[in-house]
Image (spheres, rainbow, N blue to C red):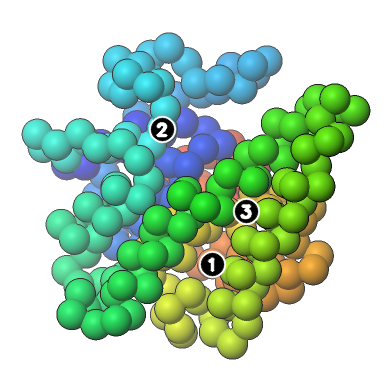
Amino acid sequence: MITVHHLNNSRSQRILWLLEELDVPYELKRYQRDPKTQLAPPELKAINPLGKSPVIQDGPHTLIESGAIIDYLIRRHGDGRLQPDPATATYDEYVQWLHFAEGSAMLPLMLNLYVSRLGEAGAPLQPRIQSELANYLGYLNQALSQVDFLLGDELSGADIQMSFIGEIARKQGLLGPYPHVESWVGRFQARSAYQAAVKVGGDYSYAS
């Protein structure tokens, strides 16, 4: 049985969504953020010394990092679902999106969040942050301009990995100029497996 160590309002929500899409049974262990600091509780460090989520345990294997977990679950439990044939060029595009989410797109979104808390002290950084946000969100918007999902008409693990990017961007009020990203978020959030995962995970402010 797969165990998901789930922190509310975190990247681990997309792991629950993946497991619901795959219809793979799992056990959920919940961790709640401190309401004042929004930090994970110290108990999570007993599972992951970094104190971060998601973490999964599958038999003898313990994995951290969303992209690695998504890749692992699809390879080990997907039976060919939610990823292209590894022999195709589309698979290379799929892997690129798995890395793009955290390797490129997440940084300006996190900087936008943290620097905005500095008020005027953060103002000198804002032009560069906004330029990078426009760069990455524009790239994503163009990729979605003629397709329902990142690899075409069907959902894949790439969409699940990238979903947190779209949700955070929408939460920050950034999607006005990017209608294809907005529509994509609406499409994947309407999926029954996504909605089931939100019910299971609870307290996920990015779902609306």
Q: Is residue 142 above or below residue 58?
A: below
Task: State how far apart marks 1 and 2 are (Cα).
Answer: 22 Å
Q: Is residue 151 visible?
A: yes
Q: What residue do we see at 16% from left, 40% from top?
A: 58
Seen at 27% across and 56% down, the residue is 71
Amino acid marked by disc 2: Ser
Farthest residue in the right direction?
Answer: 120
Which residue shows up at 72% across the image and 61% down it? 134
Q: Pick out the residue farthest to the left.
A: 60
Type of residue at label 1? Answer: Phe
Q: Is residue 134 left or right of residue 21?
A: right
Asked if labels 3 and 1 touch by Cβ distance under 8 angstroms, the answer is no
Judging by the rendered image, the residue that carries numbered circle 3 is 167
Crowd rating for badge 3 (residues with CA inside 10 Å; few <14, some 14–19, many 20+)? many
Q: Nearer the viewer, residue 164 or 126?
A: 126
The percent coordinates of residue 83 (x first, y second) are 29, 71
Instruction: Identify the residue under disc 2.
Output: 53
Task: Place residue 124 in its image quadrant.
Answer: top right
Q: Residues within 10 Å of mark 1 (few under 14, many from 20)?
A: some
Tag 3 and tag 2, C-beta contact below 8 Å: no
Q: Which residue is mark 1?
A: 188
Circles 1 and 2: CB atoms closer than 8 Å:
no
Of the image marks 3 and 2, the number of the one nearer the N terminus: 2
Between disc 1 and disc 3, the foreground one is: 3
